[in-house]
Amino acid sequence: MTAKLRATDTKKMDTDLQQLSADQELILNQVDNAIALFDSSECLVLFNKKLADTWELSPEWLATKPKCELLFAEIVDRGYLSLQQWEQFQEALKTSQEQNLSFYFEQSNGICLEVFATITNSGGRLFTFRDVTVYRTSQASLNAEVRRLSFLLGLTERLQNSHSLQEIGRFALSYLVEATNAAFGDVKVISGSGNDRQAAAISNQVSGQFLASYGEPVAAGMQELLDKGIPYGIGLLWKVVETGQPLLIDDYAQHPNAVPQFRHPGIGQLGIFPIASTDGTIIGVLTLESRNVKKLQASLHQEVLTAACRTLGTAIERAQTQENLRQVNEQLEYSSQLKSEFLASMSHELRTPLNSILGFSDLLLRQTAGQLSTRQINYVELIEKSGQHLLQLINDILDLSKIEAGKVELNLLPVRVHELATDCLKMIQPRADKKRIALSSELDYRINKVLIDERRVRQIVINLLSNAIKFTPEQGQVKLSGRLAYGSEIKGDYRPDCSPVNDSTPYFCLEVKDSGIGIPQDRWNLLFRPFQQVDSSLTRRHEGTGLGLALTKRLAELHGGTVSFQSVCDVGSVFRVWLPLTEMRQESGSFAACALDSKLIPASAIALPIGSKRILVVEDQPFNQMLISEVMELEGYGVEIIADGKAMVDRILAASTAPELLPDLILMDIQLPDVDGFELMRRVKADPVWDSVPMIAVTAMAMAGDRDRCFEAGASGYLSKPLDLNLAIATIRSFLS
């Protein structure tokens, strides 16, 4: 009975064990992960169907309890894993100090497995294999998208902040070469036109793998060609330039139109992409060698490549525009330099004969060589008047050119405006009297002194008064006014510029009002422009160059002010100059000016140190030699003439050995044959015998900086042609007294 019961219990236990094993297998097979349990001797004691399916293993073979190393060797033999991956996993199992270990396998079939290895209580190991392919792919896609967006953002930022086309090209290539697994990439810019075009690389990048495989000399040869430029018609890139469409080549090295220097086994699949300007013109190409053309064709990379080419096109276009602007600026600077040199040359060429005309006219009017008849005096006065008019035109041209070149500085000092206005009216009165024009003034006595450049403001007032008298018929009226005004009062006037005016800013407003012919409104735009006149026809009745108002405007702006006017045809015009009473925009500078009475000073009016004083005149122009000699001899001085620089050098050497030949004063012209005046003055100052002899530079050079250059060369004084004889005599006396 007992044996029977025991048999029954054993049978029941076997049934229960079978049921438990079946239930266990059912549960294990329901799990989505592959499971393998190894005992302490590393034999497989438990697995599920997922394990067999994952690597196509036979369940019967697995049931033979193969060891762990044998199981993974089978997986490696079947090609799912590499031997290196298995060895790395083994090393991780041995060195791990943790109870649990996580490891990733990326299999050759593209499936990515995450392995969890857990040590059991009996000393065995439980492996759980989880398919994480979708997760890893999503993560990789997300990372790629982040890199793509970061690249596009970085490319945009560099375009905004960088002026270096090479830097933008390097940044783009560093991303694209890596993203497409390329051996190299470059950005080329198209230059020239027609068949003379060339494509030269502004940036290129070669991968480390390519260098390791084929060496530096190969890359150096390619670089040399890229730097030199690929001529039109050579290579496949010109097809992209002509069509504007990208070109993908499967085997570039074997292509019949490939550039010979690039026929290399390391260069296979190639993509050439057009870089267009904003108007669609192809101005460059992007070249990428890729291990997989499909990567270049993928929509994700296509979007990146399109954005990169668009950004590179903008950068290239901006760089080319900046280069064009630089060249234009250089040309403008060169043109400005030529203009300055021309004006300096013309100033000298015109002032030299004017010096003779005005000087001899002055001598004739003094009547020191004999009495003139009334008619002869009138003729000479007309000659002098015409010469002075021509001199004024020359000065106006030079003044305007200096202002435009930014070479004029203001000498701002407190000036009594009432005295300035009175002086200007006295100067202009004779012109008004000839036309029987009533000249009047009205000044605001609340304003006593104004911080201005007296010479320049005097020039402004004389210009406006001269224009008013010129364009006012006989028996008309011209009025000069000066008053305190505010910026809000300018609003009703026409202004030639759009400079900002503060309504509350106080101004000293100089106003010239006339009853003249007026200005048609369609001619207002011509005012204040150089060499423009309201009446510019060949039959005009009013002389002038049209520089007066242009100078007036520029001089007012130098003071930080502006000009405005109102005009009605056949009624008259009002011109206003607004000089701010607040701080001037132009800093105070040094400006040499000499205020001498314009009337002639007879020689007898000043006691002269007449005696044996000898003056050495270095001058190449015969008329000027005659003029200076005549004036100096009339003053009682002895005169010696030297006509060229070489003769003066000989004279310096002669007097060095015979000091008794030294003159008491030297009048030195600057522009001389053979050796110029600057060099001669330097030689005089360098000679210890001549060093004590004062030198006065007498020159037609009247551009900005000419006076300083003369003093730097050794001059003790400076006189500009045409000579003001009163100033010349006074200056010479000051050195000989």
Image: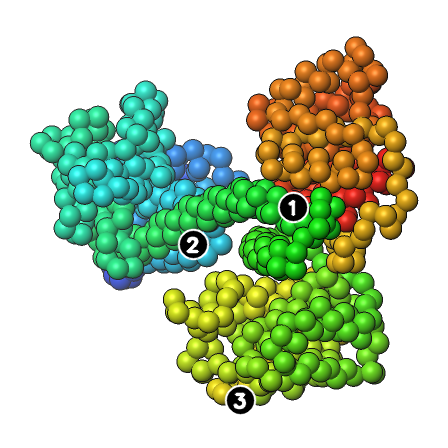
Looking at the rendered image, the disc whose residue lies closer to the viewer, 2 or 3, is 3
Q: Are marks 3 and 1 in contact (CB under 8 Å)?
A: no
> Type of residue at label 3?
Val
Q: Nearer the viewer, residue 423 or 144?
A: 423
Mark 1 neighbour density, 10 Å: few (under 14) some (14–19) many (20 or more): many
Mark 3 or mark 2, which is nearer the start of the sequence? Answer: 2
Q: Residue at x 90, y 44 (%)?
A: 607
Q: Residue at x 71, y 38 (%)?
A: 630
Residue 56 position, x and y percent, is 18, 45
Residue 571's label in the rendered image is 3
Quarter of the image that includes the C terminus: top right
Q: Residue at x 68, y 81 (%)?
A: 439
Query: Which quarter of the figure has residue 700?
Result: top right
Q: Name the residue under label 1.
A: 360
Q: Is residue 519 left or right of residue 438?
A: left
Residue 222 position, x and y percent, is 28, 27
Q: Name the residue under label 2.
A: 159
Residue 563's label in the rendered image is none
Can residue 275 be seen from the camera position used here? yes
Residue 264 position, x and y percent, is 20, 26
Q: In this view, does 33 lie to the left or right of 525?
A: left
Q: How far apart are marks 3 and 1 (CA)?
A: 44 Å
> Type of residue at label 1?
Phe
Label 3 sits on a secondary structure element that is: loop
